[in-house]
């Protein structure tokens, strides 16, 4: 037969209170780090989504102008809002309006507009030249530079 195993005592079974407290403290620290990183990522995504929306709407306005053989205007309004409208003779028919989140700022002046003619060429407000749109949230800033042919360049500062 084999050698008998020594009897185990229950004296050393389980974890001490100190060991459990150390593990809980380490998990709390790691959880705080993950939460802080996730919050910053989520905040950054909101800014990037707003920049993408403005860029896409500039390009969509150009596409509408070409496909409908009419002028299309992206007009900037107060309160971080802008609207996209198609010409109807001397009037403009509003297609839709976009409001950026409250914590995101656009650099435009109320009344500024980017207008595409039926051939897809843009006209911009006189100043600045080239026309730029700055979107800011906290210390993060993106610059959108639309071109005369509807291309949009986005630069993070």
Image (spheres, helix red, strand yellow):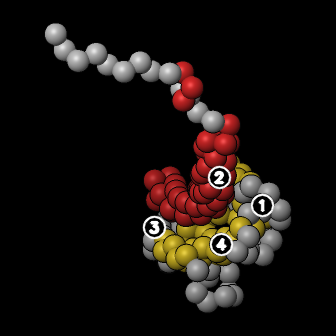
Q: Secondary structure at mark 4?
A: strand
Label 2: element kind = helix
Q: CA distance from mark 4 to mark 1?
A: 12 Å
Considering every residue shown, the one lying at the far top of the view is: 1
Residue 21 lies, in percent from the top left, at 68, 42
How many other residues sit within 10 Å of disc 1, few (<14), some (14-19) or many (≥20)? few
Seen at 54% across and 21% down, the residue is 10
Q: Quadrant of the N terminus?
A: top left
What residue is at 78 percent from the left and 75 percent from the top?
109
Circle 3 or circle 4, nearest the eye: 4
3 vs 2, front mark: 2
Residue 103's disc is 1
Mark 2, Cα crowd under 10 Å, few <14 / some 14-19 / many 20+, is: few
Task: Determine which residue is flagged by label 4.
Answer: 140
Instruction: Decide which of tag 4 and tag 1 comes sooner along the chain.
Output: 1
First along the sequence among labels 1 and 2:
2
Give the alpha-carbon distance from disc 3 to disc 2, as whole Å. 58 Å
> Closer to the N terminus: mark 2 or mark 4?
2
Name the disc covering residue 119, or none. 3
């Amino acid at each position: 037969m084999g050698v008998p195993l020594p009897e185990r005592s229950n004296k050393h079974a389980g974890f001490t209170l100190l060991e459990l407290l150390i593990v809980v403290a380490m998990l709390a620290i790691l959880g705080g780090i993950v939460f802080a990183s996730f919050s910053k990522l989520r905040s950054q995504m909101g800014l990037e989504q707003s920049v993408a929306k403005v860029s896409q709407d500039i390009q969509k306005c150009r596409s509408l102008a070409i496909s409908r053989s009419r002028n299309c205007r992206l007009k900037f309004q107060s309160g971080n809002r802008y609207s996209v409208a198609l010409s109807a003779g001397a009037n403009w028919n509003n297609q839709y309006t976009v409001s950026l989140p409250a914590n995101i700022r656009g650099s435009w002046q109320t009344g500024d507009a980017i207008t595409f003619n039926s051939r897809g060429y843009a006209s911009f407000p006189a100043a600045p030249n080239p026309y730029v749109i700055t979107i800011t949230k906290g210390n993060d800033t993106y610059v959108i530079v639309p071109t005369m042919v509807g291309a949009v360049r986005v630069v993070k500062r």
